[in-house]
Image: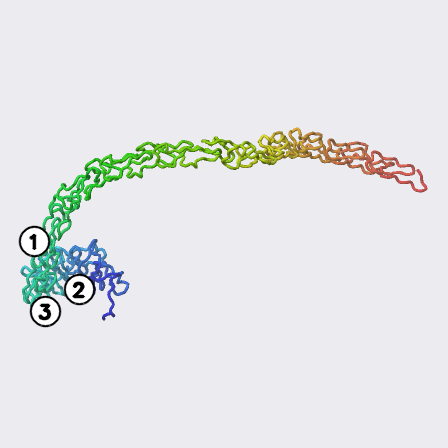
């Protein structure tokens, strides 16, 4: 036992407010006003929409416990368990029960069990039907019956029971169960007769009996009495209670008190209550608080103290009648019930003539253009009209009217908008708050101006800057500030006369073109490259530029002698700048050149002649067009302007200036590209008799019977007698062999070489005829290259 016992886990952060136990199930009313049950569930007594037993394994408890669904928006206020059924009083004072129901103990007019099917719980739960115009205040469940205490229309608390009645536990005649039919319930239920004008203070139900504690501190019990459990001195069952249980001297219940031990208790007086029991003095009864009253005696709670309605108040405690609640007076209100101090005064800026006002909306607001600093006024007579120079733009102003800002004024009385505050015109200002006349707007003085409308201070008048002055009063723009003339200056701010402009002369070599100069230092030096040779100059145009070929590298020069001659411009450059500030040489442009130095004009740059070009600035000479090209233009700037000689022509020299300088290729040669330096010769074996040939095809091969043994031939030669050429493009002719001859020129075949006949010979090639054998020799066959000598001893 003790700390060794395990507590029931109802879920994280959840505690119990009440518990109830049946035969084999237990239920708890949790701190969140939800009901959870665990244990045996054969009749749905756990209220979870099934017959599942809960609590036999750990993971069914705690956060896994399913709460009983009492319907949308309903919570539980109490819990009671019978043998196999469970009941609760819901937050709307209705009674719902679930579980075992063979005797109608659920109060739904049937014997159907409820809670073992999910469709029977939640919004499907039926509330027990009791008397009309009555309210249940307590529900108790016995083994097979259910009883309630209920408040009747006459405010007395009675008892109603339904369910099993075999032993009279319902407190009505007969042994018939009540609640198995709808006709048993509602206004058909019989009230348990408690006797006299008494009420039931509490109920208790057992297995087969029921007991009630009455407000006269007596106890009545009825039902089963086999063991004397009814306390009436016998064992007879009671169906209608008549004899109270004798429990000895009374202990006064809540709402009563006694000053001595005895049987009689006195009720607390009207205007008081007592929530505890056993009090022995009227002083123990608590007075209803100020702002409330109670006209009934014997009350047990401050809930019976009726609060004074809104619009009323009472400072009296223990009041017994409504008459103590007094009306709020005009100029005040009370928006809460039970106010125990004086009513709330209407706030400044409002008033009310209503008596018994219940909220602040009865406090009427002072209209725009008025104000009131008084709390709780009863009429609008306290709403004071705003004076000229002030305004109130909202209703209910509780402080004095708002002042027009500095820089503005208003002549309107009772103004309800700041728009009635007219701004001082530009060129003026006003420092007055709440001004009521335009005369408060002061003009800006001469030498100053203001473009602002509604200027609130003298500082809004801007001073004319140094070098300027103004004679105008109330000027609205800086345009009135006239500039000191050229050659004069003024250091004064806000000058109001031209006399403030001081005359001064700039020295030679300087000038002043400034209008509105603010200091003597406004003289500007003639810039470098120029000089000024007189004083008092008023314009930069008086500064004279140094001439071409000279420069001046400092400002403020007063003589042309200060201009320095430019020296040493190299070939390809010159200097012609007027007013130069340094010795700067300018390069001749592309396409031009100079060969000398020290030139002072661009005209000294000579344009390149035909056949040449210059592609860079500052050239001291022009470049010649390369061999194979020419240029007829003057001042050419690129080698791309040199035109190549056409195919069929050539030029071996550079710097040519006309197309005529390109020569035609001679017969026996050709040129097939542009820009040729020379012509290509026709090969040996070919010839060409064309001038200016531009293709190799003009070199024609020599025909058979002819040849060309040198390049650049203009014609082919015939093969001589004793030789032949059988194909084209030959560089030489083939000789007839020894033993043969040919007398024909231009022969094209080897067959023209004829064999020497017998008796003749040819000992060399290319023979044009055969020779006769000499005496003493012979040739017996043709084609011989020699004759045979007669043998010794013979002759011919």
Q: What element carries label 1?
A: loop
Looking at the image, residue 739 sits to the left or right of residue 474; the answer is right
Disc 1 target residue:
321
Q: Can residue 240 be seen in this view?
A: no
In-front residue for pair 321/397: 397
Query: In front of the other: label 1 or label 3?
Result: 1
- Alpha-carbon span between mark 1 and mark 3: 48 Å
Badge 1 crowding class, 10 Å Cα cut-off, few under 14, some 14 to 19, many 20 or more, is some
Name the element at disc 3: loop
Q: Which residue carries the number 2 mark? A: 83
Q: Nearer the viewer, residue 479 or 265?
A: 479
Question: Residue 147: x, y in percent?
Answer: 13, 60
- Residue 377 quadrant: top left
Above or below for 635 versus 295: above
> Are the residues tagged 2 and 1 within 8 Å (C-beta)?
no
What color scheme is it? rainbow
- Split into 4 quadrants, where in the image is the C terminus? top right
N-terminal-most mark, 1 or 3: 3
The answer to whether 304 appears left or right of 521 in the picture is: left
Marks 2 and 3, the one that precedes in the sequence:
2
In percent of width and height, residue 154 lies at 7, 55
Residue 75 in picture, x, y percent from top left: 20, 56
């Amino acid at each position: 036992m003790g700390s060794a016992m395990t507590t029931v886990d109802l879920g994280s952060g959840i505690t119990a407010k009440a518990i109830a136990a049946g035969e084999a199930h237990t239920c708890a009313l949790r701190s969140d006003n939800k009901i959870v049950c665990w244990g045996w569930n054969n009749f749905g007594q756990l209220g979870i929409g099934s017959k599942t037993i809960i609590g036999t394994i750990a993971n069914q408890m705690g956060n896994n416990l399913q709460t009983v669904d009492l319907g949308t928006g309903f919570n539980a206020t109490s819990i009671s368990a019978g043998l196999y059924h469970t009941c609760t009083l819901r937050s709307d004072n209705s009674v719902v029960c679930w579980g075992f129901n063979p005797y109608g103990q659920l109060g739904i007019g049937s014997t159907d069990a409820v809670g073992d099917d999910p469709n029977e719980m939640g919004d499907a739960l039926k509330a027990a039907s009791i008397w009309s115009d009555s309210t249940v205040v307590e529900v108790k469940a016995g083994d097979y019956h259910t009883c309630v205490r209920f408040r009747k229309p006459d405010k007395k608390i009675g008892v109603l029971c339904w369910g099993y009645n075999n032993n009279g536990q319902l407190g009505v005649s007969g042994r018939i169960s009540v609640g198995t039919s709808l006709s048993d319930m509602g206004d058909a239920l019989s009230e348990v007769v408690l006797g006299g004008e008494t009420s039931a203070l509490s109920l208790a139900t057992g297995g087969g009996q029921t007991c009630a504690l009455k407000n006269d501190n007596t106890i009545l019990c009825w039902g089963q009495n086999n063991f004397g459990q009814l306390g009436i001195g016998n064992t007879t069952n009671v169906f209608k209670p008549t004899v109270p249980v004798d429990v000895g001297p009374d202990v006064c219940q809540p709402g009563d008190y006694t000053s001595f031990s005895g049987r009689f208790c006195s009720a607390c007086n009207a205007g008081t209550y007592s929530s505890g029991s056993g009090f022995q003095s009227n002083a123990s009864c608590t007075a209803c608080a100020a702002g409330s009253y109670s006209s009934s005696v014997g009350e047990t709670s401050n809930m019976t103290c009726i609060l004074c309605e809104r619009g009323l108040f009472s400072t009296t405690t223990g009041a017994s009648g409504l008459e103590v609640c007094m009306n709020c007076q005009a100029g005040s209100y009370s928006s809460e019930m039970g106010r125990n101090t004086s009513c709330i005064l209407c706030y400044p800026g409002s008033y009310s003539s209503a008596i018994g006002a219940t909220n602040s909306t009865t406090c009427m607001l002072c209209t725009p253009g008025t104000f009131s600093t008084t709390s709780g006024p009863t009429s609008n007579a306290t709403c004071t009209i705003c004076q000229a120079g002030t305004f109130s733009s909202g209703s209910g102003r509780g402080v004095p009217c708002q002042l027009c800002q500095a820089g503005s004024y208003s002549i309107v009385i009772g103004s309800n908008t700041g728009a009635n505050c007219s701004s001082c015109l530009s060129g003026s200002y006003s420092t007055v708050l709440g001004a009521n006349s335009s005369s408060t707007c002061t003009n800006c003085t001469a030498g100053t101006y203001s473009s602002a409308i509604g200027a609130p201070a003298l500082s809004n008048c801007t001073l004319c800057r140094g070098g300027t002055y103004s004679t105008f009063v109330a000027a609205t723009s800086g345009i009135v500030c006239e500039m000191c003339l050229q050659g004069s200056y003024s250091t004064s701010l806000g000058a109001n006369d031209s006399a403030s402009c001081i005359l001064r002369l700039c020295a030679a070599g300087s000038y002043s073109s400034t209008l509105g100069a603010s200091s003597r230092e406004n003289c500007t030096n003639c810039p470098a490259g120029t000089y000024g040779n007189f004083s008092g100059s008023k314009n930069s145009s008086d500064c004279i530029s140094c001439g071409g070929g000279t420069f001046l590298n400092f400002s403020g020069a007063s003589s042309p002698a200060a201009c320095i001659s430019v020296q040493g411009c190299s070939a390809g450059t010159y200097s012609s700048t007027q007013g130069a500030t340094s010795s700067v040489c300018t390069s001749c442009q592309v396409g031009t050149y100079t060969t000398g130095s020290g030139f002072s004009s661009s005209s000294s740059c000579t344009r390149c002649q035909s056949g040449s070009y210059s592609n860079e600035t500052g050239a001291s000479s022009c470049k010649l067009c390369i061999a194979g090209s020419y240029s007829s233009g003057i001042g050419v700037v690129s080698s791309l302007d040199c035109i190549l000689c056409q195919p069929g022509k050539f030029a071996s020299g550079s710097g040519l200036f006309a197309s005529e300088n390109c020569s035609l290729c001679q017969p026996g040669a050709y040129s097939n590209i542009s820009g040729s330096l020379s012509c290509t010769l026709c090969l040996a074996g070919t010839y060409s008799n064309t001038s200016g040939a531009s293709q190799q095809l003009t070199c024609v091969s020599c025909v058979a019977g002819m040849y060309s043994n040198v390049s650049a031939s203009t014609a082919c030669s015939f093969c001589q007698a004793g030789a032949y050429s059988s194909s084209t493009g030959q560089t030489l002719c083939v000789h007839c062999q020894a033993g043969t001859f040919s007398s024909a020129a231009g022969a094209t075949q080897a067959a023209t070489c004829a064999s020497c006949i017998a008796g003749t010979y040819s000992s060399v090639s290319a023979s044009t005829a055969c020779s006769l054998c000499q005496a003493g020799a012979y040739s017996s066959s043709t084609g011989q290259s020699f004759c045979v000598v007669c043998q010794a001893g013979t002759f011919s």
